[in-house]
Image: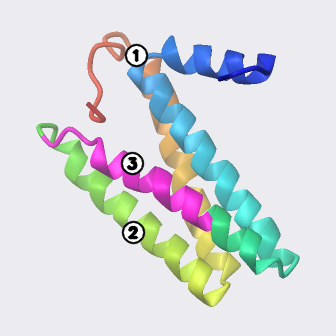
Amino acid sequence: MITSPYDKYRQSSVQTSTPAQLVIMLYDGAIRFVKMALDGLSKQEYEKSNLNFGKAQSIISELMGTLDHSYEVSKGLFSLYEYTNHLLIEANIHRNPEKAHEALGYLGELRETWLQASKLPNAQNENVHG
């Protein structure tokens, strides 16, 4: 049962969002978790970094799983998600912030692309993430 006003707001915003807005929210979450993982690495709090890298990877896996492969662009997105996921695994295993920063760069660019695409006419009706 959701009791806090913030949680009620978040649930409402998810339920009333367009598919493109939901994808942007997923990117926001992945970016936030990678930044938290980087913070954990910098403080040598490896449990924190491991947990947050895992959360970011889960979001990327969700993005990969929801791609509509009837769109040509989905193949490229899938490959980019796969590579980004690989970077996060490497960053986590080797405690390598450079790999995490590279992944953050891709996530930020993808988020910006989705944000711009969501503003185009017909963006509400088509979405490669099904």
Mark 3–mark 1 distance (CA, rounded to whole Å): 24 Å
Label 3 crowding class (10 Å Cα cut-off): few <14, some 14-19, many 20+? some
Residue 64 at x, y = what percent?
A: 32, 51
Mark 2 or mark 3: whose residue is earlier in sequence: 3
- Element at label 1: loop
On whether residue 3 falls in the magenta region, the answer is no
Q: Name which residue lies at 65% across and 77% down.
A: 98
Please report the bounds of the magenta region as a residue range.
53-69
Task: State the quadrant of the N terminus.
Answer: top right
Please give the label number shown on residue 120. 1
Please give the label number shown on residue 62. 3
Judge whether residue 101 can be spotted in this image.
Answer: no
Mark closer to the observer (2, 3): 3
Residue, disc 2: 83
Residue 52 at x, y = what percent?
A: 66, 62
Dot 1 amino acid type = Leu
Give left or right: position of 21 versus 7. Answer: left
Mark 2–mark 3 distance (CA, rounded to whole Å): 14 Å
Seen from the viewer's position, the closer of residues 47 and 120 is 47
Give left or right: position of 76 versus 111. Answer: left
Relative to 129, residue 74 above or below: below
